[in-house]
Image (cartoon, rainbow, N blue to C red):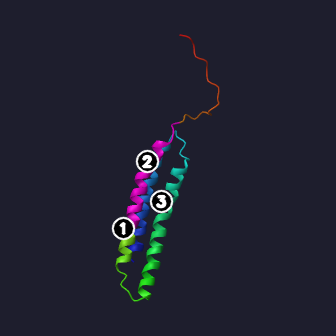
Amino acid sequence: MLLLATVPVAYLLVLATFMSLDACAGRDCRGILVQAIVVAVKLTPGIVAGAAVIVAVVMLVLRRRAWWIPLTGIVVMFVVLIVLGELLPAAIAEQPFEVNQPANAPTAPRSGL
């Protein structure tokens, strides 16, 4: 129950991570690393919570203690989200700054002054 209650809190971290995409103003943030991080951030809470629930049920069926599995899932979920949240600004900084102008657009000739 505690694990499933932390998933909405984890999505607040996801929201905070996406707020760092505001740095993409004027940049082309369609790099493969940025896209991979965004997809991983979106999927992490659901995958970790689902895996922890499945493992806990299996442990309970095998009549073993399973109280530590949701706690481990919570810790793993937040560690992964924090690491991905720290990687995203670095991936954005790696992207080149571009003016909204095509690369092959003609430019005005420079005067000799």
Q: Which residues are magenta?
A: 74-97
Residue that label 1 marks: 75
- The percent coordinates of residue 46 (x first, y second) are 48, 68
Label 2 to label 1, Cα distance in Å? 22 Å
Instruction: For marks 1 and 3, give the CA distance.
Output: 15 Å
Callout 2: SS: helix
Q: Secondary structure at mark 1?
A: helix
Which residue occupies the extreme top position in the image? 113
Amino acid type, residue under disc 2 in the picture: Pro
* Residue nearer the viewer, 46 or 25: 46
Q: Main secondary structure of the magenta part?
A: helix
Which image quarter: residue 48? bottom left
Residue type, mark 1 in image: Val
| Percent coordinates x, y for residue 60 in the rendering | 41, 86
For residue 7, above or below residue 103: below
Q: Residues within 10 Å of mark 1 (few under 14, many from 20)?
A: some
Q: Does the magenta-highlighted stretch encompass residue 36?
A: no
Image coords of residue 27 (percent x, y): 52, 40
Q: Which residue is mark 3?
A: 41
| Disc sitting over residue 89 in the figure | 2
For the point 47% across and 64% down, which residue is it?
Answer: 44
Crowd tier of the residue under label 3, counting other residues whose Cα lies within 10 Å: few below 14, some 14–19, many 20 or above: many
Instruction: Work out how far the residue at label 3 is from the one at label 2, CA to CA, in angstroms.
Output: 13 Å
Would you place residue 87 above or below residue 62 in this image? above
> In this rendering, is residue 10 above or below 71?
above
Is there a contact, CB below 8 Å, between mark 1 and mark 3?
no
- Residue in the picture at 44% in, 57% down: 15
